[in-house]
């Protein structure tokens, strides 16, 4: 979160006083008809009230009453490869950044580049999800929310994430496998069908659909723009009040 600095408070004080002092000078001049008296009154008032404004602002920063902490949340995008989860997650992240909250983006591709020898067996993927869960938990301990996108094909690993992190919101990005194949410009599905890729979700490995997702987005029926609106609205209603 952001804290008001002394310089910002002072600048705010001066900008307000320019407006307020001009008003004071005009009022004094209208009542007494003396410009010198009006200017003197305006200058004295400016110096005193800028100082009082600064003291007032700094005092309220220290008062906790009336402040509400935004608890960190985790948006967990799951779905078949090429279902559209990364595209939607990127757009949602961009929209949520406009709300000026501490936020980080985590994508499976970026994490695997950092840890290249993870593997894709069920055991390796589940172990990998625990690593990701610990990362999100650490960020949340520092009041940072996350937007994460992972195929995460197994129910037990998604359950582990839900148990490890706070305010976990599962977004199931649903798409027919034929649709995913049409979106595949890199030929990953074809390679999996030929046996070049093993443990490829939806081809030679299972994808277990979420049974308790907070949000379900069917990308065969819902556009990216509509999907983003649905998810951001959910976050504003349930996590940022």
Image (spheres, rainbow, N blue to C red):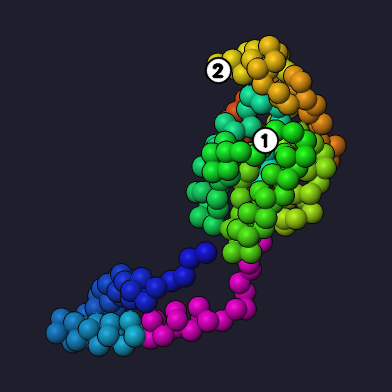
Q: Can residue 18 be seen here? A: yes
Residue at (61, 72) in percent of width and height: 67
In the rendered image, residue 114, in percent from the top left (x then y), is placed at 54, 43
Count residues near mark 1 (Cα–Cα under 10 Å), then give few for <14, some for 14-19, many for 20+.
some
Left or right: 218 with respect to 97?
right
Q: Residue furthest front?
A: 117
Give the quadrant of residue 72: bottom right
**Closer mark to the observer between disc 1 and disc 2:** 1
Q: How far is disc 1 from disc 2 in space, using C-alphas?
A: 20 Å
Q: Residue furthest right?
A: 211
Dot 1 or dot 2, earlier in sequence: 1
Q: Nearer the viewer, residue 117 or 45?
A: 117
Give the quadrant of residue 157: top right
Give the residue at mark 1: 119
Vertical position of residue 197 compared to residue 168: above or below: above
Residue at (63, 68) in percent of width and height: 68
Left or right: 16 with respect to 117?
left
In the rendered image, residue 227, in percent from the top left (x then y), is placed at 64, 32
Q: Secondary structure at mark 1?
A: loop
Residue at (24, 82) in percent of width and height: 42
Q: Nearer the viewer, residue 194 or 70?
A: 194
In the rendered image, residue 11, in percent from the top left (x then y), is placed at 31, 71
Range covered by the magenta-colored residues: 52-72
Rendered image: mark on residue 186: 2
């Amino acid at each position: 979160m952001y804290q008001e600095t002394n310089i910002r408070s002072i600048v705010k004080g001066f900008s307000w006083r320019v407006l307020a002092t001009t008003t004071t000078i005009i009022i004094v001049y209208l009542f007494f008809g003396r410009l010198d008296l009006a200017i003197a009154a305006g200058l004295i008032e400016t110096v005193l009230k800028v100082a009082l404004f600064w003291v007032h602002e700094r005092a309220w920063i220290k008062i906790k009453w009336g402040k509400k902490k935004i608890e960190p949340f985790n948006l967990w995008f799951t779905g078949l490869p090429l279902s559209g989860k990364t595209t939607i997650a990127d757009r949602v992240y961009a929209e949520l950044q406009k709300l000026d909250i501490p936020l980080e983006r985590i994508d499976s591709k970026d994490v695997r580049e950092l840890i290249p020898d993870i593997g894709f067996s069920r055991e390796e993927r589940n172990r990998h999800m625990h690593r990701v869960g610990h990362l999100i938990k650490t960020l949340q301990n520092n009041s940072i929310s996350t937007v994460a996108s992972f195929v995460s094909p197994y129910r037990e690993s998604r359950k582990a994430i839900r148990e490890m992190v706070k305010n976990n919101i599962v977004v199931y990005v649903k798409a027919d496998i034929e649709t995913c194949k049409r979106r595949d410009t890199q030929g990953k599905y074809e390679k999996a069908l030929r046996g070049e890729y093993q443990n490829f979700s939806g081809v030679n490995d299972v994808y277990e659909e979420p049974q308790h997702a907070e949000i379900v987005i069917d990308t065969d029926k819902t556009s990216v723009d509509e999907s983003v609106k649905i998810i951001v609205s959910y976050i504003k209603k349930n996590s940022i009040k």
